[in-house]
Amino acid sequence: MKPFTRLDARAAPLDIANVDTDQIIPARYLKTVERTGLGKGLFAAMRYEADGSPKPDFVLNQSDYASAGVLIAGDNFGCGSSREHAPWALLDFGIRCVISTSFADIFYNNCFNNGLLPIVLPEDEVRSLMDEARGGNHVFSIDLEAKTVTLPSGRIVNFNLDAGRQEKLVKGLDAIGETLQHVSSIDDFEAQRRLTQPWVAA
Amino acid sequence: MTGKTLYDKIWDAHRVAEDANGETILYIDLHLIHEVTTPQAFAGLRAAGRPVRRPDRTLAVADHNVPTINQAAGTGAVADEEARLQLQTLERNVAEAGIEFFPMGDVRNGIVHVVGPEQGRSQPGMTIVCGDSHTSTHGAFGALAHGIGTSEVEHVLATQTLRQRKAKNMRVWFDGEPAPGVGAKDFALALIGLIGTGGGTGSVIEYAGPAIEALSMEGRMTLCNMTIEAGAKAGLIASDAKTFDYMRGRPAAPKSAAWEAAMTYWSSLHSDPDAVFDREIRIDTAALSPLVTWGTSPEDVVPVSGHVPDPADAPNAARATQIQRALDYMGLTGGQPISEARIDRVFIGSCTNSRIEDLRAAADVARGRKVAAHVSAMVVPGSGLVRDQAEAEGLDQILIAAGFDWREPGCSMCLGMNPDKLVPGERCASTSNRNFEGRQGPGGRTHLMSPAMAAAAAIAGHMIDMRDLPPVDGVA
């Protein structure tokens, strides 16, 4: 997994609450056996007309935001389906950080397995970030080690993230490799289980 | 020291190790897999040279992508090239790993959350995961069951564990005796309408109370299924005599002495009387009427006798904008009676409502009646075994005589990924779980409701309280 340390990128405001994973990437794009190439389906219904042409009023279709690397969204971003295609589509488009007041649990976890940084901030802070993103200069600077977002105005916003999740992103850790360091504990657990719950562990 | 909740007990029984970063490595008893969220996981294992640790604790089905006709022709006959490749990739992956698999067309195949319980694979006290958010369904058995992403699917295949952080404990207590025609789907919609789609975020919900005890296992599955729509990690219900009666004799259920030992253990799995929940909610089921959704979020709930909300009455500007956006998408006007909206399609199926009791409820409404001329209605059983059972009971004939299309099992029109989908602007009365924009097909408009209510909508041509349908000729 690609480590995440710093990001300097344009930020796009998507002022909609409860953006679900069907909106992020509709199911018809999920018929793939690859992790890549999903960017074309990102926000498909909001982004394209029925004939496939871009909808001019959608934020990521506007020239200022077409190369956005940060998305600022309304409450409860990523609710619904467990599809990891949602973070894959965001990443494939070029978005490496999403800022919201809250995220749905499965989407939030999926982000950390893919090097996508979800930042949770209070509502008034998210509002002010959206305002700055709507201004003339949209470049935000995110420093994950310092846990700060530097806004175009120069103001620095701190965010919270627990140390474990931070480390996962900063080091780009392979979770399976980390867990396999505990393989003897897994062996022991299974051996014990065969004695106590033979109907499960047979 | 205070007592433990059911969630605490299952969590504690599955802790393998604590990692330095604050995560617990939790053992997984059952891993259900399907064609859509696994190809990248198997590819990852192959690239890293990692084997599947416990193929025997894994079960595979083909459900999301399958057409709901002509399944006997096999995967090679699936017309959609990408879907066919995904289905064939699953076949190859499970054969290589030695994972039990019910292929499309096998009578045991069906929607993953119907098949697991039906086979007796889902059991009390287990940890159950699947790359599908509606894995919460299996919580009906007193299991800790939840959806995971594809990276986590790969992690479970490789290690039979998951890295987890403990969620909060929340209890929803369902009191009272519901009126006839009010059931598990209404319980779920009532809860989501009350706490919202983010209301359960970060929590595991335990459902309890007299109205839960009175629910059948299939009703409990419907309720637990929609827990994810309230944003919760998982929903669960302590096992009881109904659970054991449902499980006894199923293919993968423990047998003879092991059954007795298992029952003893399962009976110990309930929240202690002095267990403390972080949040408690109480819902009086006697006060509920049949519910439907009007908007594009499962929290947009209204009684079928009620009115669509008016943005002018919204508590704030942000909510007014949100309501207006949903009304525009749904082609509705604020303040109009929901029953005025004319229905084009009806879908009875999905992991929420495709089990035998659901089909019986639909057939009860359909018996002796006709689907409205302008409505196209389909019934999609949750598995081949459910389909066989329904046919043995003659439910298919009742539904076909009424004008319903009787299909083969699969996820079908729940998610707009296989050939069953809405065309833009079509309005559907659906027993599925999500009314998101485009969920059942681009531009499709979904109203969620129970199977009996969906059948009634098919007959009336609009949403209606099924208790208000005109009586059938010749029936008192």
Image (tube, rainbow, N blue to C red):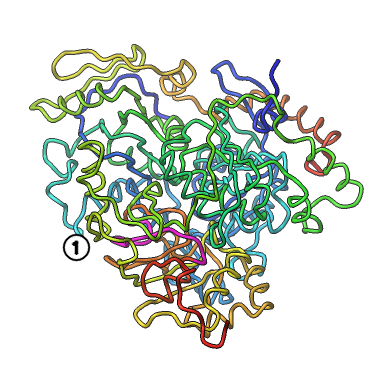
Q: Quadrant of residue B358?
A: bottom right
Q: Position of residue B338 (x, y in %)?
A: 33, 61
Q: Magenta stretch?
A: B438-452
Percent coordinates x, y for residue A49 in the rendering: 19, 58
Which residue is denoted by mark 1 in the rendering? A51
Vertical placement of residue B290 versus B198, above or below = below
At 54% from the left and 62% from the top, the residue drawn is: B181
Indicate left or right for B107 with B181 as reference.
right
User: In this picture, is A184 found above or below B84?
Assistant: above
Residue A102 shown left or right of residue A53 in the figure: right
Quadrant of residue A140 within the rendered picture: top left
Residue lying at the far right of the rendered structure = B257
In terms of secondary structure, what is the magenta stretch mainly? Answer: loop
Left or right: B394, with A110 as reference point: right
Q: Nearer the viewer, residue B406 or B64?
A: B406
- Locate residue B294, reporting x and y percent: 34, 56
Q: Amino acid at mark 1?
A: Asp
Residue placed farthest to the bottom in the image? B474
